[in-house]
Amino acid sequence: MSQYKASPHRCQAATTHGTRCRNSGTQWVALNHETESLLCPEHQRHAREGRLRVCESQPREVFA
């Protein structure tokens, strides 16, 4: 588990106004094979639907 996953952070998604979401991120979501972002429940749904922009992301941890 990375240091990012051990502490609470704000959601890393961008709002429709282009600013960062003010909600608390509750789950790390893989955006692709290389990156993941901490997202609030609403933005997790948008990620599943394929309509999400993020302000920030981290490299995904790959376990052997």
Image (spheres, rainbow, N blue to C red):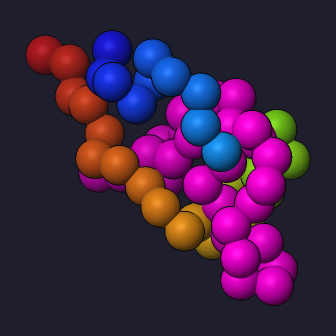
| Residue name at image x 68 percent, y 67 percent | 20
Q: Nearer the viewer, residue 35 or 13?
A: 13
Q: Is residue 37 above or below residue 13?
A: above
Q: Residue at x 66, y 60 (%)?
A: 13
Residue under the image location 75 percent in, 60 percent down: 21
**Where 62 falls versus 45 (above or below)?**
above
Task: State whether the magenta stretch is mostly helix, strand or loop.
Answer: loop
Percent across and percent down for residue 22 are: 79, 55
Foreground of the two, 28 or 22: 22
For this rendering, which residue is in front, 23 or 47?
23
**Rendered position, 61 above or below 36:** above
Indicate the quadrant containing the C terminus: top left, top right, bottom left or bottom right.
top left
Residue 26 place in picture, x, y as percent: 70, 29
Instruction: For the N terminus, give its image quadrant.
Output: top left
- The range drawn in magenta is 11-40
Q: Position of residue 33 (x, y in %)?
A: 33, 48
Q: Position of residue 32 (x, y in %)?
A: 41, 53
Residue 33 visible from this viewpoint: no
Residue 33 on the magenta segment: yes
Above or below — where is 62 with respect to 16?
above
Q: Could you say which quadrant of the image residue 18 lies in?
A: bottom right
Q: Could you tell me how many numbered marks the image carries? A: 0
Residue 26 showing in the rendered view: yes
In the visual, does 55 lie left or right of 42? left
Which residue ends up furthest to the bottom in the rendered image? 17
For this orientation, the residue located farthest to the left is 64
- Is 29 covered by the magenta stretch? yes
